[in-house]
Image: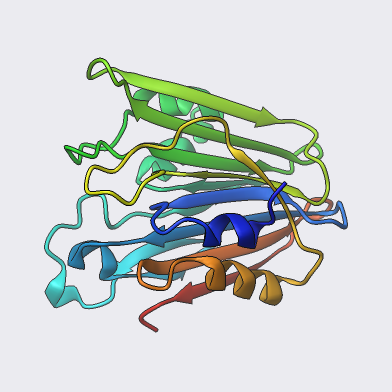
Amino acid sequence: MKTIAQELSSMRYPGRGILLGVHPDGNHAVIAYFIMGRSENSRNRVFVTEGDGIRTQAYDPSKMKDPHLIIYAPVRVSGKRTIVTNGDQTDTIFDGFAAGLTFEQALRSRVYEDDAPNFTPRISGLVDTEDGLKLSLHIIKKSAECDSAVRFHYDYEAPQAGFAKLIHTYTSASDALESFTGEPKTLTVPDCGLDAFTELVWNALDADNKISLFTRYIDARTGAFDTRVVNKYN
C-alpha cells in the first residue's frame, strides 16, 4: 500500500483531487483537496477562505477569460457535514441537505462537466461527524458509449484510522485526458500535525501543474477543525 506522498508524486497531472481519511489517532478526519491546471485560465486561480469553507478566485482578474467551471466553492459546511467537490455541485449538495436530501440524492440532478472533449468527471466528498465518523465519495463520469452519465458512490461507514481514500479527475496527462477509473485509492495517512501534512501533500504534487491546496483536520468528537490553504501564486 502506498503512502499519500508516493501516490501523488507518481502522477504528473491527476487534475483535481479529493482525499478523505482518518488520522492515526483515530479521532480526527483528514481532508485534502487540490487543483492543478495546464491552461492559462485554469492556472489563474487561488483558494480564499469563505465562512467555514473556501472558494476559488482569479489571481489576476484581468486575465480571467471564462469563469465557467473555474470559479466555485470547493468546500462548504452544513451542520456537522463537510462537503468537498471539484465544482459548483458543492452548492447543489448544500441546498439538497437543506431540502432533506441525502448526499447521493442531491447529486442525481448533476452530470459530468460540459468541457468537451474532456468531459471532466464531477468528484465529490463528504465528511459526516453527526453520529460517529463517516466518509463518502462520489464520481459522475460520461459513459464511453454515449452521452449518459455514469455514477459511482462509495460509503465508508467505519473508516479505519491511519488510512485515506483518494479520488481524482484524470489518470493521464495526454492531450486527450482520460477520466479516473476504478475505486478510490487506499493510502496510508502519516502520524503528523496539520502543518507537516499540508507540506507533505503540497511537495508531492507536480511542481509545474499544481495550483492550490486545501487541508483540514476535523475533531470527530467535537466538530472543531483546523484548516490550511496553500496557493502557488501567493
Q: Residue at x 70, y 75 (%)?
A: 196
In the rendered image, which quarter contains the C terminus? bottom left
**One can see residue 106 in this view:** yes
Image coloring type: rainbow
**Left or right placement of residue 176 versus residue 141 in this view:** left
Across and down, in percent, residue 224 comes to: 74, 61
Compared across the picture, whether 213 is left or right of 24 comes to: left
Q: How many marks?
A: 0
Where residue 226 sits: x, y (%)?
68, 68
Q: Please indicate whether residue 90 sits to the left or right of residue 197 in the image.
A: left
Give the residue drawn at x 49%, y 28%.
99
Residue 179: x and y in percent read 37, 37
Q: Quadrant of residue 204?
A: bottom right
Is 183 drawn above or below residue 146 in the view shown?
below
Give the x, y percent position of residue 192. 79, 70
In front here: 66 or 178? 178
Residue in the picture at 55% in, 26% down: 153
Quarter holding residue 32: bottom right
Q: Residue at (17%, 37%) from the top-left corner? A: 117
Up/down of 96 relative to 127, above or below? above
**Dividing the picture into quarters, in which one does residue 27 lie?**
bottom right
Q: Residue furthest bottom?
A: 234
Q: Is residue 101 visible?
A: no
